[in-house]
Structures are given as C-alpha cells and as structure tokens.
Image: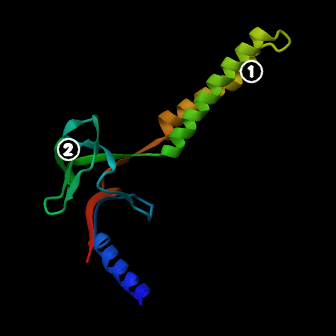
Amino acid sequence: MLIRILILFSIVFYSGICQCQTFLQLNRFANPEPKRFYVGDKLTYKLNSFGDEWFSHTIDDLNLVDSLIIFEQGFIDVSNISELRIYKPVVRGLGAKLIQFGVLWVVYGIIIDLVDNNNPFTIGNASIGLGGMVVGWSMKTFLSKKDYKINEKNRVKLMYLGY
C-alpha cells in the first residue's frame, strides 16, 4: 500500500516539473535532428543590424507571444538573428591538449638535450612538437565552431512543448 502511494505521489510530483518546455530551435539543412537552446544556455549570434559583430549572452527567458529572446542585458527579436554559432567543446578541448602536448614535447626535448649530450634535440623532434601545436591550434581556431546563416535552409524559431 505504501509503495502505491509513493508511486502515485511521484507521478503527480514529476508531472508538474515536466509539463512544459520552451526553447529556441535551430533547424539545419539536411540534418533531421535540430539544435535546441534552453533557458540558461549561452547563445552566440549575429544581428542583421550590427554587421560582422558577434554577441554572446546567456538566455534568461523566452517570450513566445512577442517572439523575443530575453537576456540580462536586454532582448532581441528572433527575426533579427542573421547567424548562429555552435561550439564543439570536444574538438576545442582536444585542440588544447594537442597544443599542450606539442609545447611539452619541445620543452622536454630541449631539457634532455641540455642534460644529456647523447640525445641531441633534432629537427625530427622539433617537427613532432611543432606539428602538434599547429594541428591543435587549427582545431581550436577552425574546427571547434560552426556558423549557420539563417535563411530558407537554416531556420530559427521559438518552440513551446506543453499540454
């Protein structure tokens, strides 16, 4: 009897928490799974009226009636967004670790060369370290983010899922 009361209580309690969700959705061309931004997520975007300037703010609230994204510093209309940027934290972290590997490879190679004359620091050793640094920097700079222009292929809209 106690188990039935606990199950009934948990169903009633959790249904109030999960009854509705409001989010910003990016529908990408040729990608069946949309990217969703919830309240509390960081949004990086460009506006039509500001040219090439990127803004990055945390979403405080989403107003479905007026189609507004509300931040701590102000608000924007969804139709004013010209581009969205999505970051890939795994690629960015891997790039940082490759840079760290390259720097450590060169530093330890130079230290070993100074301490032990039998192990000289050669161009091959330097190329391994510098190659790691270049690949890591390239990953952090070019591969860790993806920009989506908002047009007929990529669309942004506010969504409300509730009953």
If the image is split into quadrants, where does the N terminus sit? bottom left
User: What residue type is disc 1 on?
Assistant: Asn
Q: Position of residue 7 (x, y in %)?
A: 40, 83
Judge from the rendering whether residue 27 lies leftward or rightward of residue 139; answer left or right. left
Instruction: Identify whether 85 is placed above or below 31.
Output: above
Front residue of 61 and 81: 61
Numbered label attached to residue 72: 2
Residue at left 25%, top 78%?
163
Q: Position of residue 134 (x, y in %)?
A: 59, 27
- The answer for how far apart the CA atoms under marks 2 and 1 are is 50 Å
Q: Position of residue 125 (x, y in %)?
A: 74, 21
Residue 9 visible in the current orientation: yes
Instruction: Identify whether 59 is placed above or below 36.
Output: above
Helix or strand or loop: what does disc 1 sit on?
Answer: helix
Mark 2 vs mark 1: which is more N-terminal?
Answer: 2
Judge from the rendering whether residue 39 lies leftward or rightward of residue 145; answer left or right. left
Numbered label attached to residue 125: 1
Helix or strand or loop: what does disc 2 sit on?
Answer: loop
